[in-house]
Amino acid sequence: MSEISNFERENKAFKLLKRRSNFLFFMISLVGLAVLFQVIKLTIIDANIYTTKAEENRIIRVPIYPSRGLIKFSDNELLVENVVSQALLIIPAKTLEIERTLEELKIILDIKEEAIEDIKQRLDSKNLTYESLVIVENLTQEQLSKYIVERSKWPSTSVKAQLMRFNIYGHLFSHVIGYMGPVSNEEMQDSNNFKYPLRYRIGKTGVEKFYEEEMRGSIGYKTIEVDVHGNELRELDRVFPERAKDIYISLDKDLQLLARKELDGRKGAIVALDPNTGLIKALVSSPDYNPNILNKTELGNVNEILNEERGPLFNRAISGNYPPASTIKPFIGLLGLKEKVINWDSTIEDEGFFQIAPEGRKYRGWKEDGHGMVDLNKSIIESSDVFFYKLATQLTIDSISNFLALFGFGSKTGIDLYAETEGTLPNRKWKIGKIGESWFIGDTINLAIGQGYLSCSPLQLVVALSVLATRGKAYKPRVIEKIDNNFTKTQLLYEVELTNENDWQRLEDSLSSVVSAWNGTAFNLTEFGRVKIAGKTGTAQIKSLIDEELTAKEEYEGIRLEEINRDHALFVGYGPIPNPLLSVVVIVENGESGSAIAAPIAQRLIDFYVESKI
Amino acid sequence: MPRKAPLDFQLNTNLDGNKTTSSKIFIDPVLFLSLITILIFGLFVLYSASGQSISMVSRQASYIVFGLILMMFISRLDQALYKSFLVHLFWLGLILLLWVLIFPAKGYSTDRWIDLGFISFQPSETIRLFLPLAVAAYLTRKQTRPYLKDWALVILAILISSFLVYKQPDLGTALIVFISGFIPVFLSGFPLSILLISLVLISAVSPFLWNSLSPYMQGRFLTLINPNTDPLGAGWNIAQSKTAIGSGGLLGKGYLSGTQSQLDFIPESHSDFILSVIGEELGFIGICGLLLLYGIILYRVFSIAFSADTEFSRLSLTSIGFIFLIYILVNVSMVVGVLPVVGLPLPLISQGGTSIIMHLMAFGFVLSMKKRQTW
């Protein structure tokens, strides 16, 4: 190979190198142009967008939540307080070893298997990886100290202090106070002026729910500068939250305590209120529950409360529908007087049954042999059914229905608690719509003794009774007496006018005689009663007398063997006479006898209340 | 004024009469000063990007000093001396790559480091320099056009090197190693027909290649196509760096005043994403200034390359120039969101000892191969 040819080859290679270099330059320039354009776009064209973004990144607004308002008695004694609890949280996205983390937490912190299973299920069900999930709502001191020692093992977990609700009296006020739970999606959307964060615990029942808005206060904000990890670098601004309001319940602690003790765990309800104001003094629904377990401030089995057959969450006092039974009789009697189909002197012969026509169906009274000659007074004292059967045939369902509506039957009282029932006040239209049958005279007869389609809540009954106690006025019942320093207003709910105002007094005399007369159905109260009260017993039949050929007694023996088929015992009463301070309704489910079971409870409650007021 | 001796006399007198090797780094003052400027600029940026960490900056400065010493040393060497030795350096680099795979250093999440106790370095960075030089040396060892056999052998070496880097696993550097090795092959006249056929074949098997990528790497590609798919993963990096650069605007927010970078919003802000700090704090002007400096350096490298007197030096210097250019381009593209996040440092600026030392060594080779001028 000669020098010349090598020189030529090198020259050729150099030209090739230049050619290929130019090609590469060209290709690279294309990418370079794209990059240059992008830089210009970012820094000049879209600069404003990114400037805003950078600010958003850096400056964030963090809400400050006020601590929830307290619940107190009217004498300022604390009833529900906020306690600090340490919740253990996990952000699944922050770890690849969630199984290991959970397993170690379970062993080291001694967390219940169910809690771990629950977390695992929630992980499976939804894509929640960036959310922080609660493993344990409140760590014990021991768990907390163990966690702090070993926390570096579990970078995805954290402990967050939060305020939780603690009911000092546990079970006692469960159906008034209610419990707290994590906010649901619907509840989040419904609150327009308060943006709930995830997992925020809000009132689910009772006054916790009804006065949620007052007790949660309003959110404050602090504007802070943060780094990428969300660590606060400095605070720029702060708007303090509006202080939450404390609420004061009108209930009398000792009366409530006595009422709960009197029910003694039997299914039933007691409502006691001041007829002159509508302020509730006692409200017990049995069975009840410990709200602290649901509030996660006390250990306990949540499922037991939620799933238990006896329904401890069900507020019988305001949501339960019961036939008013004989307690309706005074009202029907008043209507008879008002419609002038009877007067105080009208009498009939009570032979133990009633027939619309000879050979027709026999409507039996509770007393097989009858009460003999009865007038309105006696038929209230002895609770004659037959008198009211007869009276019913002289009235129309429309007039009965309209008259009972004046006392609040068939409509909610508007108490400051949720889930109130309006009961059932039937009429022709109702029956066709609901049952699909037209109204029969027999229906009216049943209704006149508080059976059949008529039903109401214990609260409705005690409000209706208050109309008798105050001679024509019922006030809207309420459990909250004061919000911060503002007293809640006494609102007139129903006003009933009679053609003869004297009838109020005569009716009260009859109701007093129920307790005081030797033949009264609640005469047994005189043995121990210290305060003069007026009242009416009732025994609500669950199973109606299907076969009229059987006597009431025979039938009773047959079907009442099972406890759930036994009659409900009712008593409504107020005292002292005159100038009543307290109206009481007592319903003991399957208690069988209004006079033996329900009435003594009411007497003791009124005695206790009146004596404590002196 | 006292009379002074001529400059060359001053220089030559204390160098034992060796005129030709006299401080070659000063032979190209433009290149040398540009390098020094960019390195100092880099230290300032690093100070800001590292959250004003003096220790990180002083460590980086010591790497720079070490790199500059190496550069000066190499610049004094005669290319004839090291040309044949470069192939052995390649073997050394290959052994180091195997070493990290077999004996991964403790304390690092990926097997990219060799820990020598006093210093740890990344063999993938060394192979990135030695591979193209060895390839250029090998292809120009004979005074003939390379045979097909030579190319095949060289491409095998390139594939092995990049595969070993890919195994670390470091897809970005593996691609860069492959490109670094392939550039001298391409420039020395690799047949275009074979290149085209290979490209067609590769695009045909690309679906299978895609499936062989790890989800982490697939994710990085997908993130580029739609950054919103993973706003907290790799997409987060791109979104945050775009926000930083964009919010810098034309003039920037001022040195040390970038909220994004100072508040730690930009991930890897001191290494791969350091350009976003420049963009945020010094703005469009700052980026342009940096690119201008790079341009001057590249201009000098390519003019030295095209005026060099041997085939080897022309080929190796052009390759070094292109590799440097591609490095810049890939990093900038990544930071502004034009290419996937591949984890490549910005040359001479990003924190990282091995990278900066290797780049400075490359410039040492550039200076050593500058055509001897008579003066």
Image (spheres, coloured by chain):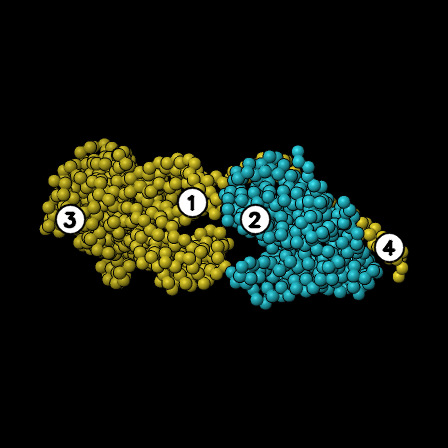
Chain colours: A yellow, B cyan
Q: Secondary structure at mark 1?
A: loop
Q: Identify residue for label 2.
A: B61
Separation of disc 2 and disc 3 at Cα? 92 Å
Q: Chain of mark 2?
A: B
Q: How packed is label 2: few (under 14 Cα within 10 Å), some, or many (20 or more)?
A: some
Measured from the top left, where is residue B212 in percent x and y? 65, 62
User: N-terminal of the two: label 4 or label 3?
Assistant: 4
Query: Which chain does tag 1 point to?
Result: A
Q: Nearer the viewer, residue A314 or B288?
A: B288
- Horizontal side of residue B181 vs B37, given as left or right: right
> Where, quadrant-wise, is the C terminus of chain A in this rendering?
top left
Distance from Cα at disc 2 to Cα at disc 4: 45 Å
Label 1, on which residue? A197
Residue A584 horizontal/vertical position (percent)? 21, 45
Q: Which residue is mark 3?
A: A604
Instruction: Say few, some or many: other residues with alpha carbon within 10 Å of mark 4 (under 14 / 14 to 19 / 20 or more).
Output: few
Q: Which chain letter matches label 3? A: A
Mark 3 vs 1: CB contact within 8 A: no
Image location of residue A187, percent across then percent down: 42, 44
Say if labels 1 and 4 share a chain. Answer: yes
Q: Are marks 1 and 2 in contact (CB under 8 Å)?
A: no
Element marked by disc 4: helix
Please tell me whether mark 2 sits on a helix, a strand or a loop.
helix
> In this orientation, which residue lies closer to the viewer: B152 or B294?
B294
Nearer to the camera, A179 or B263: B263
**Residue A507, image x, y percentages:** 18, 39
> Residue at image x 39%, y 47%?
A200
Q: Amino acid at mark 2?
A: Ala
* Residue B206 at least partly seen: no
Q: Residue A7's mark?
A: 4
Q: Are marks 4 and 3 on the same chain?
A: yes
